[in-house]
Image (tube, grey):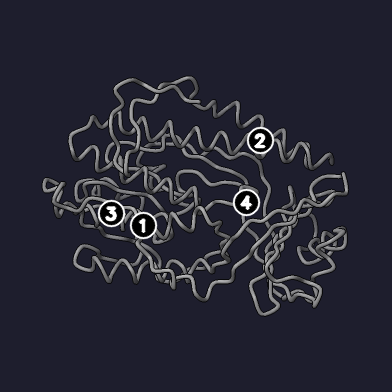
């Protein structure tokens, strides 16, 4: 059964007020979908063409996406499905095998399908224009739009500029990503995670004997192709499943980041623009989806009469709590998996940045989500 979200009749006071969404990825499109269902008019600014990474989406996030968007089951028909994960982490030599269904999805293809779905239902409430925004003219936009949602990714500076904010970085590590050809030994429904002395590697089949290979390293020394080849040779298992490497290697930042403040007067940061996670979480899409749900519920709650400062404070507390739990998870994994001097320095950077950031603790929640609507609690609930 799909999740029922009340229609625009509840929000007569907000009909046709316009919201600007910067970014047309999963977070931005989900915000657009939820807001248009509740009567808002939305304008999306994004680049006409950009590359998105391959996404590995677990079943929890997939079902959440399906329920929010009311997608038919055949939406996933041509995405490659994985059934289990195998992990060789640390120096104990063991392999942990577990059932873990995932869908392997091209990020551009997913965004295009969601965009098509959005236009089919709400074409009269959604406008699009190619991103041509100067951060020097943001003040003018705040007069034109009821809200500005920054869903422009980790490189976006929109919300940071609007809130005179600072983006905290927790390390320097990066990912080397490359498509590979699999050997006949590889099982195409199983993906692997394996550590080597200077990093960890991730191998996920894409179907048709192809796979995405990603390698996390704290620092790039020398040529990326040589480095990746060395890392592969150090593996005990993954090297047995790689027949051939492609010529192209993509490099992208993979350390967690968070913006402070996350929101302000008529603006919010969502998805990677709010905070981005280490790929070790395996659920970057899930974080983006849940953040979009919370952001849109905050906007609707304020429009319905709840106190703006209280709603925005709840948004900050929820996101900071989720991000700090992610940081703790990263530290636990990396302390267990690596002892090299490079990784020790990376871990120390994370720990130092965490102290500087100083997340909000021991605060009480004053609101909660109920059927995707933000409601005030009768009694404040402490953060667990």
Q: Earlier in the sequence, mark 2 or mark 1?
A: 1
Pointer 3: what residue? 20
Disc 2 secondary structure class: helix
Pointer 2: what residue? 350
- Left or right, 4 with respect to 336, comes to left
Numbered disc in front, either 4 or 3? 4
Tell me whether the residue at label 1 lies in contact with that at label 3, contact meaning CB atoms closer than 8 angstroms. Answer: no
Vertical side of 284 occupied by 115: above or below: below
Q: Residues within 10 Å of mark 1 (few under 14, many from 20)?
A: few
Q: Residue at 63%, 56% (x, y): give it.
A: 100
Q: Residues within 10 Å of mark 2 (few under 14, many from 20)?
A: many
Residue 245 image offset from top left, x and y in percent: 76, 74
Q: CA distance from mark 4 to mark 3?
A: 29 Å
Disc 3 secondary structure class: strand
Disc 1 secondary structure class: loop
Q: Residue at 55%, 42% (x, y): give it.
A: 257
Q: CA distance from mark 2 to mark 1?
A: 42 Å
Disc 4 secondary structure class: helix
Q: Residue at 41%, 60% (x, y): give it.
A: 66
Q: Earlier in the sequence, mark 4 or mark 3?
A: 3
Q: Quadrant of residue 230?
A: bottom right
Pointer 1: what residue? 1
Q: Residue at 48%, 19% (x, y): give it.
A: 362
Q: CA distance from mark 2 to mark 4?
A: 15 Å
Q: CA distance from mark 2 to mark 3?
A: 34 Å
The one of 169 and 127 positioned closer to us in this rendering: 127
Residue 68 image offset from top left, x and y in percent: 36, 56
Residue 318 image offset from top left, x and y in percent: 44, 34
Q: Earlier in the sequence, mark 2 or mark 4?
A: 4
Q: CA distance from mark 4 to mark 1?
A: 31 Å
Q: CA distance from mark 1 to mark 3?
A: 31 Å
């Amino acid at each position: 059964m799909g999740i029922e979200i009340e229609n625009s009749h509840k929000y007569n006071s907000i009909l046709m007020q316009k919201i600007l969404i910067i970014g047309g990825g999963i977070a931005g499109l989900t915000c657009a979908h939820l807001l248009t269902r509740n009567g808002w008019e939305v304008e999306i600014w994004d680049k006409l063409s950009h590359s998105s990474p391959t996404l590995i989406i677990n079943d929890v996030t997939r079902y959440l996406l399906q329920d929010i968007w009311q997608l038919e089951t055949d939406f996933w028909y041509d995405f490659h499905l994985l059934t289990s994960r195998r992990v060789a982490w640390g120096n104990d030599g063991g392999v942990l095998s577990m059932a873990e269904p995932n869908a392997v999805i091209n990020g551009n293809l997913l965004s295009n399908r969601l965009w098509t779905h959005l236009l089919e239902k709400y074409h009269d409430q959604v406008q699009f224009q190619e991103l041509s925004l100067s951060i020097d003219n943001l003040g003018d936009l705040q007069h034109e739009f009821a809200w500005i949602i920054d869903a422009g990714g980790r490189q976006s500076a929109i919300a940071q500029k609007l809130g005179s904010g600072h983006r905290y970085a927790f390390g320097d590590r990066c990912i080397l990503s490359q498509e590979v050809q699999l050997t006949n030994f590889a099982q195409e429904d199983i993906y692997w995670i394996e550590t080597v002395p200077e990093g960890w590697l991730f191998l996920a089949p894409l179907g048709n004997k192809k796979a995405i290979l990603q390698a996390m390293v704290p620092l790039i020394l020398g040529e990326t192709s040589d480095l990746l080849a060395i890392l592969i040779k150090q593996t005990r298992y993954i090297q047995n499943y790689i027949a051939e490497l492609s010529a192209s290697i993509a490099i992208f930042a993979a350390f967690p980041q968070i913006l402070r403040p996350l929101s302000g007067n008529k603006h919010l940061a969502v998805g990677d623009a709010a905070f981005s996670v280490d790929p070790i979480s395996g659920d970057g899409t899930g974080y983006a989806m849940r953040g979009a749900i919370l952001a849109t519920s905050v906007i609707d709650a304020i429009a319905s009469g709840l106190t703006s400062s209280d709603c925005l404070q709840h948004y900050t507390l929820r996101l900071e709590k989720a991000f700090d739990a992610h940081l703790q998870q990263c530290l636990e994994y990396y302390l267990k998996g690596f002892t090299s001097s490079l990784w020790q320095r990376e871990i120390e950077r994370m720990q130092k940045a965490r102290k500087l950031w100083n997340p909000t603790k021991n605060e009480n929640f004053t609101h909660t989500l109920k059927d995707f609507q933000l409601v005030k609690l009768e009694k404040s609930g402490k953060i667990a």
